[in-house]
Amino acid sequence: MEGGKSFARRDQLLIIQDKVQKKWEEHGVFNAESRPNPPKVGEKFFGNFPYPYMNGSLHLGHGFSVSKLEFASAYHRLCGRNVLLPFAFHCTGMPIKASADKLAREIERYGNPPIFPNLEEDASTEATEEAKPEDADAGKVEPEKFKSKRSKAAAKKGGDKFQWEIMRSFGLSDEEITKFKDPYHWLSYFPPLAMEDLKVFGLGCDWRRSFITTDMNPYYDSFVKWQMRKLRGMGKIVKDVRYAIFSPLDGQPCADHDRASGEGVQPQDYTLIKMEVIPPFPPKMKSLEGKRVFLAAGTLRPETMYGQTNAWVLPEGKYGAFEINETDVFVVTQRAALNLAYQKLSKVPEKPTCLMELTGQDLIGLPLKSPLSVNEVIYALPMLSILMDKGTGVVTSVPTDSPDDYMALNDLKSKPALRAKYGVKDDWVMQCELYPIISIPEFGDKSAEKVCMDLKIKSQNDKDKLAEAKRLTYLKGFTEGTMLVGEYKGKKVQEAKPLIKNMLLETGQAVMYSEPEKRVMSRSGDECIVALTDQWYITYGETEWKNKAEECLSNMKLYCDETRHGFEHTLSWLNQWACSRSFGLGTRLPWDEQFLIESLSDSTLYMAYYTVAHLLQNGDLYGSDISSVKPEQMTDEVWDFIFCGSEPPKSDIPESLLKQMKNEFEYWYPFDLRVSGKDLIQNHLTFCIYNHTALLPKHHWPRGFRTLRQAIEEFSTDATRFSLADAGDGMDDANFVFETANAAILRLTKEIAWMEEILSAEATLRTGPPSTYADHVFVNEINIAVKSTEQNYNEFMFRDALKTGFYDLQAARDEYRYSCGVGGMNRDLLWQFMDVQTRLITPICPHYAEHVWSEILKNDGFVVNSGWPTSDSPDLTLKRANKYLQDSIAMMRRLLQKQISGGKKSKKGEDARPQEENKFTVALIYVNEQYGGWEEECLRILQDKYDPKSCSFAPHQEIVQALQKSNIGQAEDFKKIQKLCMPFLKFKKDEAISVGPQALDLRLPFGEIQVLQENLDLIKRQLALEHVEVLSASDEVARSKAGTYSALLNQNPPSPGQPIAIYMSS
């Protein structure tokens, strides 16, 4: 007991799982061995899972994803297939190294163990430190002055933590935490811990094949170097200078797995228009005289520069004048200047030099000479909607083609008070005339003016309408617009755009500029920029290679259309990928060892490494144990022989071992399933396709992708797995529901108790073959469960498998118990039920299933290898008949309550039970087994007008016309009959669309009277009656038995599937 709550049931499951897991390990139940001959179709199953990153313990999110692979593997093992489920641990990349370094800095600064100051003191100290200039030259304002006002201490208030505190949250002592300043200690600590958690989770894994990444594992290190050399030899790795998301703090590109936020964000390229400030400069800018000063504006539409009327700045925005080279100065935001500095556009590389701080108000009224503009002089004017975290803070204005520009300029022209507020002279604005530059079908040559008038936009503050205006015009302008001015006059915009851009760049009137599409934060806590980097790239997106990847994808079995669309979208945009890093852990680039191979590039082919890992590493996670093969023996020729079908290598590795490794790979590959979260589609999983198509023969390409500990201790492994299965199987994010886990504990332990109770009462059970209606229904429900659960497991629908193989089967058992009555339950059927249910739940709750299999049912061997249960074909007519029976009983119960109350609802608090004087003990059930008369005619017409292919009916008018032409349509009282026909036709149409064409049958596929008569005992028990008769509504003698209640038969006549019950006291 704890806090008044008993954990006995949970503890019972924990004891069971511990006992079962020890038994599994002793017998090596999950160790997978290849066989000498190639596997036949359906003989083997090889599934895997993206290895988790080892900078902490596994969480329930890992458990949810890996449970899908575990359930699938357990199902295939249960069916008798040779199953390989391996698991490894990813340590490559920068997060571990960054965390270790952070820990070392905290120890150096705050002591060991550290004594952290309170946040106010820390904020004061750091604010002082940040104010110190790095350069003694007082004439220059260093970029630190532009840093965010949010100090490190303030950041901690927002949820950031000291690394030491994070390590404490893992349950580590101060003495243990100190060791983690060595990044390799993380590799020694967390992978074994994760392995132990997964063992407790009951993962059916061949742990002999487990490994870690990085150069700490010399065998995997050799494998990755072979892979990279192979790709380079094929021309698929090149050195290039290009834009990349970059962390200034880490001093290297920041790939998806290195990011705390912003995964999938790419560089956004702009053309930076150089709008030169015309001297003389205003007093505030006098110190810049002698230099060429430009307001630099980023644009995605260089072809529109002919129509510039002005530039825009944010009045309260903070800008700086930054040195680009000896002569040029750009006025931009500090954020843009930092990006430029890493793109070789700063006097001091990677360090923006600010000569002067400025506000947007200081810039208003500056006369500018801008490239391509038909106006010789334009002015900087105020715009209130400029975003300072996008672009440079300076915007070009083309009011003919930009709805935003048109409305902002219109506001300035029409509002003298607005001009006066920002000191804008009339002639700076009034000279701005719309100059047509592009003709767009439907919008003419002044598209912005036209669309703003059409949408009745009133001002620059109508954000939603302006967004819609841009949506309507921008894409159409690019695809269908025609240039009206310039040397490319007459050309389509999409043809002229790159030509105009190149001309601006080549003549020095513009430069290229790039920044992240959205905010990106590295795992080091650094806001990322875009840098022009000289490094090694994998040439994803190259035409021939992309075609191979698309071919592979077309032949793969994926979870759903959404997954396929995700891959297709990624293949459409994915281009060169930076594969080298200078900071972190990993494998060195073999031909350029100053670089490490980044974390998404050493994890694209490792599924193949699983097939030989146990032979190389001898079951040691780190590859450090004494093996019959030394790492240096694993040459490129050896790897080629194993994976690529090359000639046998010259090697001192025994020939038998070489052949064994090759056979392992050939037997298990390709893998049959890879389970992952949908977030990896845009990188890791697509890279996996690319690398397999480049390095392996086509018959080894992937076949299918499918985009803990605390829970186990709190609920038990099987209750946790039960809840994970119940959480769902779709692409949407799933939640672990604690109530489901608690309910699972109750269900599983109650089931064990029920089975033990049945065993103790075995002598009282009925024996022999199934003989009663209830017996046959129960057998049928078991057959249905076996078939439908098999289908659900095959389709990876584990929540549905849980429903059909456990919930529905339990409901059928409970119904059977009640239906049997005094005759009792059949012993053999109960044994069949316990056997089948145990096997069906095995993939999800294996410990519970092993306990039942061996301890309760006293079977030999392991249930995980027992085979899928056999069954007969389900009798769907019997299932429908039983549903009819249960629905009829429920309907009869409602009629009984209604007849008892005389048709009135009981008042609140009033006893609804029948009083002695009006207690009914007799029921007459009237059945009409076939439609006749006008109802029959209606159904025959609907049968004729139903299309089974589209599951739809002919138009309503066509059905009405057929009714009018029928026999009943010729009757004199047709108008009266038609009033009955119309609602009946609608009801039957809706029913047919809902349940299928069987709703149009004239009679049910079973005898209703027979079903009800076979179950009179059940009906009497359910309704607490002494006598029940089942009668035909078409038999006048039978109808007369209703006596004074016969009027009820006329008011509500029975129909097929809808019997009517009349109750009497005698």
Image: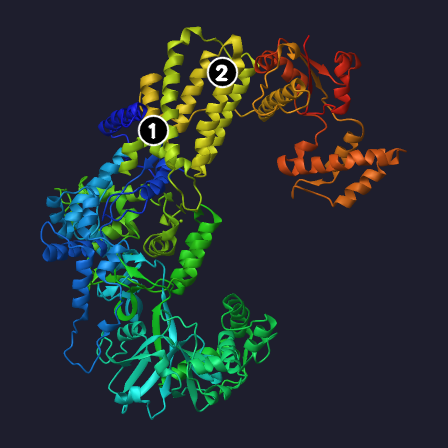
Give the residue type that dot 1 points to.
Pro
**Number of the label disc, if any, that sits on residue 817:** 2
CA–CA distance in space, label 1 to label 2? 26 Å
Give the residue type that dot 2 points to.
Arg
On the rendered structure, is 192 left or right of 880? left
Looking at the image, residue 928 lies above or below residue 268: above
Q: Is residue 53 visible?
A: yes
Secondary structure type for disc 2: helix
Identify the residue at the far bottom of this view. 280
On the rendered structure, is 817 left or right of 975? left
Q: Nearer the viewer, mark 1 or mark 2?
A: 2
Coordinates of residue 312 in the picture (x, y in percent): 42, 79
Q: Residues within 10 Å of mark 2 (few under 14, many from 20)?
A: some
Looking at the image, residue 730 lies above or below residue 718: below
**Number of the label disc, if any, that sits on residue 23:** none
Coordinates of residue 981 in the picture (x, y in percent): 78, 35
